[in-house]
Image (cartoon, grey):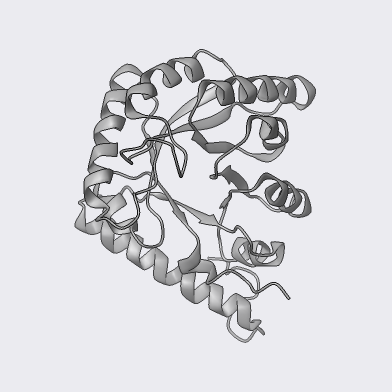
């Protein structure tokens, strides 16, 4: 097996690459252990490394360590990184709240948006993706419906009310340029993650009953990935446990 660049025996490894390799390995071990406990050792979730606030150089190091899925939550930062790192075989996921006016930019680089939560955004993304398809043949955009698991749905962290998922799903599926990938959620702060992730699994099951291909569940971050895996997460969004704390602005 070919080793990632800069990680072989006898080669000089810069301290940051070594740190990222250790952190990435530890997270992969947590994922494997959690999947084994959940009886899904042969069905590991995809690992999306959320690189917001971290430099493009870190993403290049992660790519050399085998990372292929990268997540960002600010369009301006994501667009710049995607352009700078266009030579790498990366898949870009937009995971933050998205303004409709940013849809055109996101459609240029993102393979997936994990935060689709309102009809106006579906319309904007469909228009933007259709234009990109016509101009450069891009593939359909994977869309995860972000579901709010808070009592005050969508007020603080975005997300559609569970009752609105069905209509959004029909709108996405009917666009012909957007691919309904599944659901996404962030566990509410200050409470155990298991009950909300169990709720999300139920929402996912109801969605799949009417849209059989929408099997994705984007859930689980550094602090709650084990609970997310237990309740069927297919995509994890891990940032700080791999990259460390946000870099200081000097």
- Could you say which quadrant of the image residue 5 lies in? bottom right
Which image quadrant is residue 159 in?
top left
Residue 87 visible? The answer is no
> Between residues 172 and 155, which one lies in front from this camera angle?
155
Q: How many marks?
A: 0
Give 107 or 24, whichever is nearer the viewer. Answer: 107
Residue 73 position in % (x across, y down): 59, 48
Q: Residue at x 75, y 19 (%)?
A: 134
- Left of 201 or right of it: where is 219? right
The C terminus - image quarter = bottom right
Q: Is residue 125 above or below residue 20?
A: above
Residue 37, can we see it?
yes
> Where residue 4 appears, x then y in whole percent?
60, 68
At horizontal 64% and vertical 23% (from top left) the residue drawn is 124
Front residue of 20 and 149: 149
Determine whether 63 is above or below 172 in the image. Answer: below
Q: Nearer the viewer, residue 101 or 27?
A: 101
Q: Residue drawn 44% across and 21% down?
A: 168
Q: Return the residue found at the far top.
A: 174
Residue sitting at x 47%, y 72%: 23
The image shows residue 42, relative to residue 199, as above or below, that is below
Q: Measuring from the top left, give residue 30's x and y in whole percent.
A: 33, 65
Q: Residue 85, percent across and down? A: 74, 54
**Residue 232 vs residue 54: left or right?**
left
């Amino acid at each position: 097996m070919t080793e990632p660049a800069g990680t072989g025996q006898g080669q000089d490894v810069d301290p940051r690459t070594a740190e990222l390799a250790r952190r990435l390995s530890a997270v992969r071990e947590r994922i494997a252990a959690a999947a084994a406990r959940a009886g899904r050792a042969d069905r590991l979730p995809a690992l999306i490394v959320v690189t917001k606030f971290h430099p493009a150089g870190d993403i290049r190091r992660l790519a050399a360590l085998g990372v292929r899925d990268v997540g960002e939550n600010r369009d301006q930062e994501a667009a710049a990184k995607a352009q700078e790192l266009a030579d790498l075989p990366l898949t870009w996921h937009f995971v933050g709240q998205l303004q409709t006016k940013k849809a055109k930019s996101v459609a240029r680089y993102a393979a997936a948006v994990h935060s689709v939560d309102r009809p106006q955004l579906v319309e904007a993304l469909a228009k933007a993706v259709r234009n990109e398809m016509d101009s450069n043949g891009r593939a359909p955009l994977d869309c995860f419906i972000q579901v709010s698991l808070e009592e005050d749905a969508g007020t603080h962290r975005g997300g559609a009310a569970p009752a609105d998922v069905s209509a959004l799903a029909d709108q996405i599926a009917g666009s012909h340029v957007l691919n309904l990938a599944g659901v996404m959620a962030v566990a509410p702060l200050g409470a155990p993650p298991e009950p909300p992730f169990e709720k999300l699994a139920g929402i996912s099951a109801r969605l799949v009953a009417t849209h059989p291909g929408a099997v994705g569940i984007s859930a689980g971050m550094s602090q709650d990935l084990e609970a997310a895996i237990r309740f069927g997460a297919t995509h994890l969004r891990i940032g700080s446990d791999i990259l460390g704390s946000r870099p200081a602005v000097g």
